[in-house]
Image (cartoon, grey):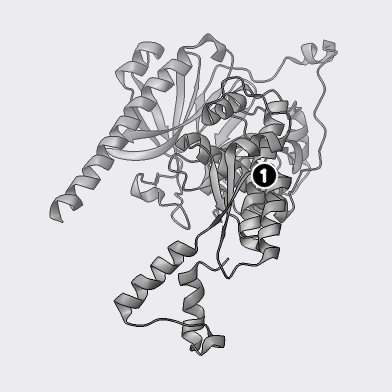
Amino acid sequence: MGTSHIFIPQQLFLLLVNILILSQEVLSEIISDPVCKDMLVDIGMGVRHRNVRYNCRIICGYQKVYLIRPKKSLANDGLHREARHFSAWAKDRQTEKYYLEDIIRKVTGQYTVPIGDAVISTLDTAVGCETCEELFTPLNPSSYMGLNGVEIILNSSASHAELRKLRTRLDLISNSTRKLGGVYVYANATGVDGEARMMFDGSSMIIANGKVLEQGSQFSLKEVEVITATIDIEEVRSFRSSISRNVQAAAQPEFERIECDLRLSRPVDEVFLSSHLKISNEIEIKILDPMEEIYLSTAVYLWQYLVRTNSAGFFVALSGGLDSSTTALLVFGMSRLVMESITAGEEKTLADLRRVTGAETFFPRTPRDIVSRLLHTCYMGTENSSVETRSRARELAKTLGAYHSDISIDEAIHAHELIIEKTLQFKPKYAIEGGSYSENVFVPFIFFEM
């Protein structure tokens, strides 16, 4: 027992160290790619500074790291235990020197970079970071940054799916930018985490002055989804100068500003001459009905679990009752979402489907084609089963396109009943046969009542 208590944390520690090293390698590859030229890139990764691990945002560009911004508020409720792995940055408006790893130095030529609570000052605007949980805190960092003149807030999040949570996120961001003005770029993770323990629901957004300009899918099978919006930064400045924020803004303590030699906007003369450049208009955000959320979240989870485990499909003991029928319908819902993804041209979805079905040339035309390969339903009848439930199970399986079996399990039940009788010296009976209330509850469990 003592050994196990020591062994598990050691393995976890080694895993974290490997992740930290791998993150540095991936960062070096990204900032070495010329595609990053003239771009301000925001990357999330763990960083170890003075032997303390922080959950950080790396603000960088081509062959350059500008700032490492650690997370100040960690998620430690519900599904999250972030403080097991990281510490929160506790020094408001302060930075320290971070000594870059060799693999990054070789790319950037830098020896140190600031780490801490600071903002980026480009040639034409100011950019700040707010990470995931910080959005939900009472005194969220973006409020102070906005009052200090930061015009663009970036939020890279891993907010898990929860019924009607999107409305909460939208209200927090919209109300913040409506009171303060500014542009809020919210990028949320999507899909199932590595342990298939929780799920993230996407719905990335771009919001300016309280108006939603663009929104990504809330539940999707896409590996990557890109949303864009064209914004006139002067609208932010005009909006801010016309609302009652300026006295508080003038009193705000200064954030350290990290100089960045990039220009994020186009020159005014180029904007006037451009015929295809159009400012994004406000859109009506899509808020799913709770039943849609349940359907889509389950569909995405089932598909990603199936693909990651490389399973052959799903088996449902279909009794013809409400619970098992709903389960079978959820698999059909998954198949419909997969069909939509393939129709939209997502090649990876089709490749994953062919891999799990073992059919290299399989190309479905309808969701039923997918169900026929991935869902096996089985009616396990007994002497207590009815003709109606058997018929309902068979017809539902046929409608969905599932492979269906109809078997009798009386022999298995009698064998199980005999084991119970020999073990307990007692044979339970239904209440109508003279048994007690407790026996009446117990008997269906033993008999696998359908």
For the C terminus, give its image quadrant: bottom right
Identify which residue, 141 or 55, lies in the foreground.
55
| Residue 240 image point, x, y percent | 73, 40
> Which residue shows up at 62% across the image and 22% down it?
347
Q: Position of residue 262 (x, y in %)?
A: 58, 17
Indicate left or right for 251 with 234 as reference.
left
Give coordinates of residue 53: x percent, y percent: 33, 39
Residue for point 65% across, 56% down? 325
Q: Amino acid at mark 1?
A: Phe
Residue underneath mark 1: 332
Which quarter of the figure has residue 220?
Answer: top right
6 or 138, which is in the foreground? 6
Label 1 crowd bin: few (<14), some (14–19), many (20+), radius 10 Å = many
Q: In front here: 178 or 162?
A: 162
Which quadrant of the figure contains the N terminus? Answer: bottom left
In terms of depth relative to the viewer, which is nearer, 44 or 376? 376
In the rendered image, the vertical position of residue 416 relative to residue 234, given as above or below = below
Say which residue appears at 64% left-offset and 27% top-offset.
125
Identified at 41% across, 72% down, the residue is 417
> Percent from the top left, x then y, of residue 427?
40, 81
Viewer can see residue 75 = yes
